[in-house]
Image (spheres, rainbow, N blue to C red):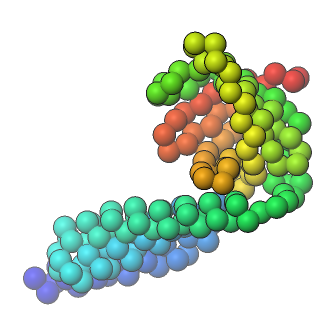
Amino acid sequence: MKTNKKVCLNVCTIMVSVALVFGSGCATKGQTGALAGAGVGALIGQAVGGDTAGTLIGAGVGTGVGYLIGNNMDKKDAQNRQTVQDEETRPLANTTWQVTSIVPKPDRPVKSLVAHFKPDGTVVSTRTFEDGHVETAHERYRIVGDTLIINQDDYVINARFKITGNQMIANTDKYSIILTRLDV
């Protein structure tokens, strides 16, 4: 039993070290929080449970709690930002994109979704629903590494994205989206 505790403690120490070293490379505070939470949760799980199951449960709970805390910090940061830097809007500034695919299908399917990214850090999205209803949303955006951050006062969406030619692929924690550039 002592050998198992020693092995688990060594694994936990390694996990926390990895979280601290690689955590600085995360694009958002939500990602950093998840990574750090996993390490801290593993340590607490090991201390309380004294076995591998406790360590894994602690790591899982810590990941979730760390992400929630970090994501809320991202939301507060987004709300407090008044201006964006040019490098935070490139390469999307002055471009218009139309969604060609969303997987899984949203609860309220859209017939058309077009997003125009402005250089001032705002994105205007026009959604046309299957029933003909049209909604326009004015949101803020910025780019950190390969993460597109879109937000309003009550939410923040982090999407990993990649542009290849006239196509953009964006992945959130809920959707995988393919967009085609319209303004070329």
Question: Can residue 158 be seen at all in this image of the molecule?
Answer: no
| Vertical comparison of 75 with 140: above or below | below
Q: Is residue 56 left or right of residue 166?
A: left
Q: Is residue 22 left or right of residue 84?
A: left
Q: Is residue 166 left or right of residue 94?
A: left
Q: Residue 105: x, y in percent?
A: 48, 24
The number of callouts visible is 0
The residue positioned 29% from the left and 70% from the top of the image is 58
Q: Residue 104: x, y in percent?
A: 47, 28
The residue positioned 25% from the left and 66% from the top of the image is 57
The residue positioned 18% from the left and 77% from the top of the image is 49
Q: Is residue 27 left or right of residue 31?
A: right
Comparing 175 with 59, the one in front is 175
Q: Residue 141: x, y in percent?
A: 75, 48
Quadrant of the image for the N terminus? bottom left
| Vertical comparison of 93 with 153: above or below | above
| Vertical comparison of 173 with 107: above or below | below
| Vertical comparison of 1 with 65: above or below | below
Q: Residue 79: x, y in percent?
A: 70, 61
The residue positioned 81% from the left and 38% from the top of the image is 117
Comparing 136 with 175, the one in front is 136
Query: Extreme front residue here?
Result: 133
Query: Extreme top residue here?
Result: 131
Quadrant of the image for the C terminus? top right
Query: Extreme left residue here?
Result: 1
**Dividing the picture into quarters, in which one does residue 183 lie?**
top right
Question: Can residue 30 be seen at all in this image of the molecule?
Answer: yes
